[in-house]
Image (tube, rainbow, N blue to C red):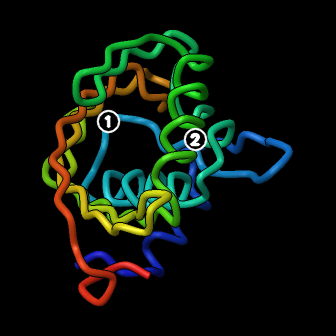
Amino acid sequence: MFRATRYARILRSSFYSTRSTTSSTFPQIKPPFTLETAKAKVKAAEEAWNSRNPARVALAYTEDSDWRNRTSFFKGREAIKEFLTKKWEKELDYKLMKELWCFQGNRIAVRFEYEWHDDGGQWWRTHGNELWEFNDEGLMSRRDMSANDYQINETDRRYK
């Protein structure tokens, strides 16, 4: 069973180096992944995405990272930052949960749910899956995402 103390130990271990940014310092967990490091990688991604800071999130990806997000295909950190900026201008009060689905070597698959509302106040829940591939330094070189949205009532929110 994965425990918070194991997560803390992983973050202090030799599996990562730290990268300093103006907003934070966060772990660089490197492949090949174990169950513990894969879970820690997913948790770190969840925390970064919940910051809703495109520059912070983009640092987890290679300079030339390939992305598919639904029907959008693009490449590179600058495109990632541009995409996330537009996303979070539309998806207000965004709150995300990611869960490890499986992993092997330098790849991780996750399922996720997130909730948000539009500028008219309508709440939405998005369900989906992501396939991640990492380079030797632990940066994501490929992200392939599929998702579906549906309307919910504010009282039905799971993530606040």
Q: Which mark is residue 32?
A: 1
**What is the quadrant of residue 19 in the picture?**
top right
Q: Which residue, as the protein is rendered here, is positioned at the far right?
A: 22
The mark closer to the camera, 1 or 2, is: 2
Question: Which of 5/142 is in front?
Answer: 142
Q: In the image, 142: left or right of 75?
A: left
Look at 17% across and 36% down and name the residue there.
146
Residue 3 locus on image (x, y percent): 36, 81
Look at 31% across and 51% down and name the residue there.
38
Identify residue type, mark 1: Pro
Q: In the image, 132: left or right of 45?
A: left
Residue 76 locus on image (x, y percent): 52, 13
With respect to residue 56, does 121 lie above or below? below
Look at 24% across and 34% down and name the residue there.
145
Tell me if mark 1 has few (under 14), some (14-19) or many (20+) residues whose alpha carbon lies within 10 angstroms of its own: some
Residue located beneath label 2 in the image: 57
Q: Which residue, as the protein is rendered here, is positioned at the far bottom?
A: 155
Q: Earlier in the sequence, mark 1 or mark 2?
A: 1
